[in-house]
Image (spheres, rainbow, N blue to C red):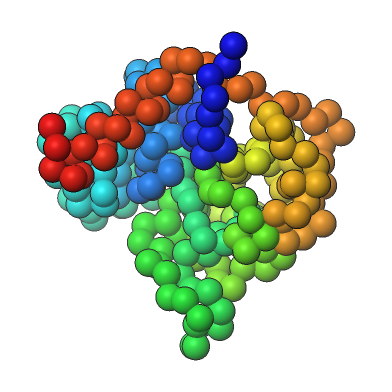
Amino acid sequence: MTAEHTASEMMTIAAARALTNDDVCFVGIGAPSAACNLARLTHAPGITLVYESGTLATRPDVLPLSIGDGELCETALTTVSVPEMFAYWLQGHRITIGFLGGAQIDRFANLNSTVIGPYAEPRTRLPGGGGAPEIATSCRQVFVIMSQTARSFVSEVDFVTSFGHGTGGDDRRRRGITTAGPTLVVTDLCTLRPEPGTMELVVTSMHEGTTRADVEASTGWPVRFADRLEVTPPPAEVELSTLRELQARTAAAHRGGS
Protein backbone atom coordinates (compact mmCIF):
# COMPACT_ATOMS: atom_id res chain seq x y z
CA MET A 1 0.00 0.00 0.00
CA THR A 2 1.25 3.46 -0.89
CA ALA A 3 1.85 5.70 2.12
CA GLU A 4 -0.34 8.77 2.56
CA HIS A 5 1.25 11.86 1.07
CA THR A 6 0.48 15.51 0.51
CA ALA A 7 0.03 17.25 -2.83
CA SER A 8 3.25 19.18 -2.17
CA GLU A 9 5.18 15.96 -1.59
CA MET A 10 3.78 14.49 -4.81
CA MET A 11 4.90 17.60 -6.70
CA THR A 12 8.45 17.41 -5.34
CA ILE A 13 8.75 13.69 -6.02
CA ALA A 14 7.34 13.96 -9.56
CA ALA A 15 9.82 16.73 -10.32
CA ALA A 16 12.75 14.77 -8.87
CA ARG A 17 11.95 11.82 -11.11
CA ALA A 18 12.61 13.92 -14.22
CA LEU A 19 16.31 14.25 -13.33
CA THR A 20 19.04 11.75 -14.20
CA ASN A 21 22.55 10.80 -13.10
CA ASP A 22 24.01 12.54 -16.14
CA ASP A 23 22.42 15.94 -15.55
CA VAL A 24 24.30 19.09 -14.62
CA CYS A 25 21.54 21.06 -12.94
CA PHE A 26 21.41 24.77 -12.10
CA VAL A 27 19.26 24.79 -8.96
CA GLY A 28 16.87 27.45 -7.74
CA ILE A 29 16.21 27.89 -4.01
CA GLY A 30 13.02 26.45 -2.49
CA ALA A 31 11.00 23.80 -4.31
CA PRO A 32 13.60 23.31 -7.09
CA SER A 33 16.29 22.66 -4.48
CA ALA A 34 14.11 20.10 -2.70
CA ALA A 35 13.40 18.23 -5.94
CA CYS A 36 17.02 18.23 -7.10
CA ASN A 37 18.40 17.03 -3.79
CA LEU A 38 15.73 14.35 -3.52
CA ALA A 39 16.86 13.05 -6.92
CA ARG A 40 20.48 13.06 -5.71
CA LEU A 41 19.55 11.12 -2.57
CA THR A 42 17.51 8.48 -4.42
CA HIS A 43 17.81 7.46 -8.07
CA ALA A 44 20.39 9.98 -9.34
CA PRO A 45 23.38 10.01 -6.96
CA GLY A 46 25.69 11.12 -9.76
CA ILE A 47 23.80 14.30 -10.62
CA THR A 48 25.87 17.50 -10.50
CA LEU A 49 24.10 20.30 -8.63
CA VAL A 50 25.19 23.88 -9.28
CA TYR A 51 23.98 26.94 -7.37
CA GLU A 52 24.11 30.57 -8.46
CA SER A 53 26.65 31.55 -5.80
CA GLY A 54 29.30 29.51 -7.63
CA THR A 55 29.17 26.16 -5.85
CA LEU A 56 29.82 23.16 -8.12
CA ALA A 57 28.86 19.52 -7.40
CA THR A 58 27.16 20.56 -4.17
CA ARG A 59 25.88 17.79 -1.88
CA PRO A 60 24.06 19.57 0.97
CA ASP A 61 22.87 17.58 3.96
CA VAL A 62 20.06 20.11 4.52
CA LEU A 63 18.25 22.40 2.11
CA PRO A 64 19.82 25.87 1.87
CA LEU A 65 17.97 28.99 2.98
CA SER A 66 19.51 31.01 0.14
CA ILE A 67 22.29 30.82 -2.44
CA GLY A 68 24.56 32.33 0.23
CA ASP A 69 23.93 29.54 2.73
CA GLY A 70 27.24 28.16 4.02
CA GLU A 71 25.90 24.62 3.62
CA LEU A 72 26.40 24.94 -0.14
CA CYS A 73 30.04 26.00 -0.07
CA GLU A 74 30.93 23.53 2.69
CA THR A 75 29.56 20.55 0.74
CA ALA A 76 30.63 21.57 -2.79
CA LEU A 77 33.44 20.01 -4.77
CA THR A 78 34.67 23.55 -5.42
CA THR A 79 33.42 27.13 -5.46
CA VAL A 80 34.07 29.51 -8.36
CA SER A 81 33.42 33.22 -8.70
CA VAL A 82 29.98 34.38 -9.78
CA PRO A 83 31.38 35.90 -13.02
CA GLU A 84 32.94 32.51 -13.87
CA MET A 85 29.71 30.74 -12.98
CA PHE A 86 27.71 32.84 -15.42
CA ALA A 87 30.24 33.48 -18.20
CA TYR A 88 31.81 30.02 -18.39
CA TRP A 89 29.33 27.53 -16.96
CA LEU A 90 25.95 29.05 -17.69
CA GLN A 91 26.46 31.13 -20.82
CA GLY A 92 28.81 28.45 -22.11
CA HIS A 93 25.80 26.08 -22.24
CA ARG A 94 27.47 23.59 -19.90
CA ILE A 95 24.30 23.24 -17.81
CA THR A 96 21.84 20.59 -19.01
CA ILE A 97 18.88 21.52 -16.78
CA GLY A 98 17.85 24.80 -15.18
CA PHE A 99 15.31 24.20 -12.39
CA LEU A 100 13.11 27.22 -11.65
CA GLY A 101 9.98 28.34 -9.83
CA GLY A 102 8.04 31.58 -9.92
CA ALA A 103 5.02 33.53 -8.71
CA GLN A 104 3.26 33.42 -12.09
CA ILE A 105 3.45 31.34 -15.25
CA ASP A 106 1.46 31.65 -18.47
CA ARG A 107 0.41 29.17 -21.14
CA PHE A 108 3.76 29.55 -22.93
CA ALA A 109 5.82 29.00 -19.74
CA ASN A 110 6.96 32.59 -19.33
CA LEU A 111 7.74 33.15 -15.63
CA ASN A 112 7.26 36.17 -13.38
CA SER A 113 9.15 36.63 -10.12
CA THR A 114 9.36 40.45 -10.23
CA VAL A 115 6.01 42.17 -9.52
CA ILE A 116 2.30 41.47 -9.22
CA GLY A 117 0.35 44.24 -10.92
CA PRO A 118 1.70 47.11 -13.07
CA TYR A 119 5.48 47.42 -12.91
CA ALA A 120 5.41 51.15 -12.02
CA GLU A 121 2.81 50.69 -9.26
CA PRO A 122 2.77 47.01 -8.29
CA ARG A 123 0.41 45.51 -5.75
CA THR A 124 3.25 43.26 -4.62
CA ARG A 125 6.97 43.55 -5.24
CA LEU A 126 8.62 40.11 -5.46
CA PRO A 127 12.28 39.09 -4.92
CA GLY A 128 13.14 39.63 -8.60
CA GLY A 129 14.96 37.62 -11.20
CA GLY A 130 18.44 37.08 -9.79
CA GLY A 131 20.04 34.63 -12.19
CA ALA A 132 16.71 33.24 -13.44
CA PRO A 133 16.62 35.22 -16.73
CA GLU A 134 20.02 33.83 -17.72
CA ILE A 135 19.09 30.34 -16.56
CA ALA A 136 15.96 30.45 -18.73
CA THR A 137 17.89 31.29 -21.88
CA SER A 138 21.29 29.61 -21.35
CA CYS A 139 20.54 26.18 -19.87
CA ARG A 140 19.93 23.52 -22.51
CA GLN A 141 16.41 23.03 -21.15
CA VAL A 142 14.38 24.28 -18.19
CA PHE A 143 12.14 22.47 -15.70
CA VAL A 144 9.61 24.46 -13.67
CA ILE A 145 8.08 23.46 -10.33
CA MET A 146 5.31 25.48 -8.65
CA SER A 147 1.92 25.10 -6.97
CA GLN A 148 -1.00 25.47 -9.35
CA THR A 149 -3.74 28.03 -8.66
CA ALA A 150 -5.67 30.44 -10.83
CA ARG A 151 -3.53 33.23 -9.32
CA SER A 152 -0.24 31.60 -10.30
CA PHE A 153 -1.25 30.02 -13.64
CA VAL A 154 -2.43 33.13 -15.47
CA SER A 155 -3.46 34.02 -19.01
CA GLU A 156 -0.68 36.63 -19.13
CA VAL A 157 2.10 37.22 -16.62
CA ASP A 158 2.33 40.72 -15.16
CA PHE A 159 6.05 40.83 -15.97
CA VAL A 160 8.28 38.47 -17.95
CA THR A 161 11.20 37.79 -15.63
CA SER A 162 12.29 34.52 -17.24
CA PHE A 163 11.54 34.04 -20.93
CA GLY A 164 9.81 30.78 -21.74
CA HIS A 165 8.32 30.40 -25.21
CA GLY A 166 7.26 34.03 -25.56
CA THR A 167 4.11 34.20 -27.65
CA GLY A 168 4.44 30.57 -28.70
CA GLY A 169 5.50 28.90 -31.91
CA ASP A 170 9.03 29.77 -32.96
CA ASP A 171 9.19 32.99 -30.92
CA ARG A 172 12.25 31.74 -29.01
CA ARG A 173 14.18 30.93 -32.17
CA ARG A 174 13.21 34.22 -33.83
CA ARG A 175 14.74 36.07 -30.88
CA GLY A 176 18.02 34.22 -31.40
CA ILE A 177 17.68 31.93 -28.38
CA THR A 178 19.09 28.52 -29.32
CA THR A 179 18.28 26.52 -26.18
CA ALA A 180 15.10 24.48 -25.76
CA GLY A 181 13.59 26.51 -22.94
CA PRO A 182 10.92 25.07 -20.62
CA THR A 183 10.21 21.43 -21.49
CA LEU A 184 8.44 20.37 -18.28
CA VAL A 185 6.22 22.02 -15.67
CA VAL A 186 5.41 20.06 -12.51
CA THR A 187 2.68 21.20 -10.11
CA ASP A 188 0.83 19.83 -7.12
CA LEU A 189 -1.96 18.71 -9.48
CA CYS A 190 -0.33 17.53 -12.70
CA THR A 191 2.56 17.78 -15.14
CA LEU A 192 2.47 19.86 -18.30
CA ARG A 193 4.68 19.94 -21.38
CA PRO A 194 4.78 22.35 -24.35
CA GLU A 195 2.90 21.11 -27.39
CA PRO A 196 5.20 20.75 -30.41
CA GLY A 197 4.52 23.56 -32.85
CA THR A 198 2.37 25.85 -30.71
CA MET A 199 4.55 25.47 -27.57
CA GLU A 200 1.44 25.92 -25.43
CA LEU A 201 1.50 24.01 -22.15
CA VAL A 202 -0.66 20.88 -22.26
CA VAL A 203 -1.47 18.57 -19.35
CA THR A 204 0.23 15.22 -19.96
CA SER A 205 -0.18 13.55 -16.56
CA MET A 206 -2.45 14.09 -13.56
CA HIS A 207 -1.57 13.10 -10.02
CA GLU A 208 -3.71 10.47 -8.33
CA GLY A 209 -6.96 11.92 -7.00
CA THR A 210 -6.85 15.01 -9.24
CA THR A 211 -9.70 15.59 -11.70
CA ARG A 212 -9.83 17.58 -14.91
CA ALA A 213 -12.17 19.98 -13.13
CA ASP A 214 -9.52 20.56 -10.43
CA VAL A 215 -6.92 21.44 -13.06
CA GLU A 216 -9.30 23.67 -15.04
CA ALA A 217 -10.34 25.59 -11.91
CA SER A 218 -6.68 26.17 -11.02
CA THR A 219 -5.62 27.47 -14.44
CA GLY A 220 -6.21 30.98 -15.73
CA TRP A 221 -6.56 29.96 -19.37
CA PRO A 222 -8.61 27.26 -21.15
CA VAL A 223 -6.12 24.50 -20.41
CA ARG A 224 -5.95 21.53 -22.76
CA PHE A 225 -5.23 17.88 -22.00
CA ALA A 226 -3.13 15.42 -23.98
CA ASP A 227 -4.98 12.76 -25.97
CA ARG A 228 -3.05 10.11 -24.04
CA LEU A 229 -3.41 11.50 -20.53
CA GLU A 230 -1.44 9.54 -17.95
CA VAL A 231 -1.76 9.13 -14.19
CA THR A 232 1.37 10.06 -12.24
CA PRO A 233 2.66 7.05 -10.30
CA PRO A 234 2.23 7.67 -6.55
CA PRO A 235 5.31 8.10 -4.35
CA ALA A 236 7.32 5.02 -3.54
CA GLU A 237 8.06 4.48 0.15
CA VAL A 238 11.77 5.28 -0.34
CA GLU A 239 10.97 8.53 -2.15
CA LEU A 240 8.59 9.68 0.55
CA SER A 241 10.77 8.68 3.50
CA THR A 242 13.89 10.27 1.96
CA LEU A 243 12.05 13.53 1.29
CA ARG A 244 10.64 13.67 4.80
CA GLU A 245 14.01 12.92 6.36
CA LEU A 246 15.59 15.70 4.29
CA GLN A 247 12.90 18.15 5.37
CA ALA A 248 13.21 17.11 9.02
CA ARG A 249 17.01 17.60 8.99
CA THR A 250 16.50 20.97 7.35
CA ALA A 251 13.93 22.12 9.92
CA ALA A 252 16.16 21.01 12.79
CA ALA A 253 19.22 22.76 11.37
CA HIS A 254 17.39 26.02 10.71
CA ARG A 255 15.99 26.21 14.21
CA GLY A 256 19.41 25.44 15.69
CA GLY A 257 18.70 21.80 16.54
CA SER A 258 20.97 18.83 16.03
The image quadrant where one finds the C terminus is top left
Residue at 18%, 45% in the rendered image: 255
Q: In the rendered image of this protein, does residue 254 appear above or below residue 78?
A: below
Relative to 235, 57 lies left or right: left
The image quadrant where one finds the N terminus is top right
Residue at the far top in the pictured view: 1
Q: In the rendered image of this protein, does residue 209 appear above or below residue 163?
A: above
Residue at 67%, 38% in the rendered image: 190
Q: In the rendered image of this protein, does residue 236 appear above or below residue 147?
A: above
Relative to 28, 79 lies left or right: left
Q: Nearer the viewer, residue 129 or 252?
A: 252
Q: State the image coordinates of residue 52 (x, y, percent, origin top left).
A: 29, 49
Q: State the image coordinates of residue 143 (x, y, percent, origin top left).
A: 53, 42
Q: Is residue 233 visible?
A: yes
Residue at 82%, 57% in the rendered image: 222
Residue at 49%, 88% in the rendered image: 120
Q: In the rendered image of this protein, does residue 197 appear above or below residue 34?
A: below
Labels in figure, total? 0
Q: State the image coordinates of residue 158 (x, y, percent, origin top left).
A: 59, 73
Residue at the far right in the pictured view: 227
Relative to 241, 186 lies left or right: right
Q: State the image coordinates of residue 130 (x, y, percent, origin top left).
A: 35, 61
Q: Is residue 96 visible?
A: no
Q: Quadrant of residue 189?
A: top right
